[in-house]
Structures are given as C-alpha cells and as structure tokens.
Image (cartoon, rainbow, N blue to C red):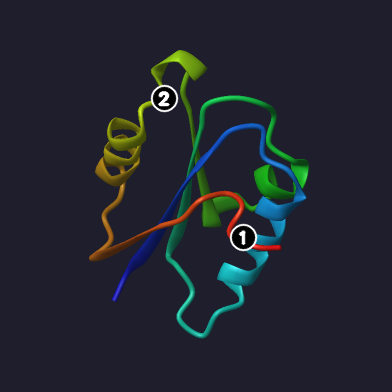
Amino acid sequence: MLIDVIIPTYNPDTKLVRIISALTEQTLAPSKIILINSGGPLPDAIRDRGDTVEIINIPEGEFDHGATRNRAAASSKAEKLLFMTQDEIE
C-alpha cells in the first residue's frame, strides 16, 4: 500500500526536519512526503532528501487551507493520504 504524507509549510524550521526524519523511520514509511511551501526557505536537510520529499512552491498569496491541500493531493498517486501540519512535534 502506498501512503503519501502532505504537509503545507510556511517559514518551516527544524521541527519539520524532525517530522520528516521520524516519518521516514516508521515501519510503514510513506512513499513520498509532499511539502507545499507558501513562504520561507526550506532547510537544506529537507531539500537534500531526494526522491523521498517532493516540494511544491506556491506564492504566499495563493495559500488557501482547502485548495492548497487539494493541489498537493492531486500530485499524489498513493492509495492513502495523511495530512499533517509542520508543527506536529515538540
């Protein structure tokens, strides 16, 4: 079963790096983590993930909670989608 994780981001910090690391270490790891970034640079540790992370950049003014998530979902070919926020971790 293919599972993709979708995370909208805005000015992401090291929490997002930790989330991505934790997700990729799961027994059933996502086939892809889709970040839809509407502002701020992504840490190098995220951009260096290769095929594991897909980054979709959008202008800040185009962010809309539902439409942004739908746009990311449309780029997925997975059977299941998990939506998260960039601050799901302490």
Q: In this rendering, would 19 be left or right of 30? A: right
What secondary structure is found at the residue carrying circle 2? Answer: loop
Q: In this rendering, would 58 be left or right of 43? A: left
Name the residue nearer the viewer: 15 or 3.
Answer: 15
Real-space CA distance between mark 2 and mark 1, rounded to the nearest whole angstrom: 22 Å
Q: Quadrant of the N terminus?
A: bottom left
The spot of residue 83 in percent (x, y) is 39, 55
Residue shown at 76%/42% (left/top)? Answer: 44
Q: Which mark is residue 20?
A: 1
- Above/below status of 31 relative to 77: below
Please tell me how many numbered marks the rendered image carries.
2
Residue lying furthest bottom: 27
Q: Quadrant of the C terminus?
A: bottom right
Residue beneath disc 2: 63
Numbered disc in front, either 2 or 1: 2
Tag 2: residue type?
Phe
Tag 1: residue type?
Ile
What secondary structure is found at the residue carrying circle 1? Answer: helix
The spot of residue 26 in percent (x, y) is 55, 79
- Above/below status of 85 relative to 30: above
Name the residue nearer the viewer: 13 or 34.
Answer: 13
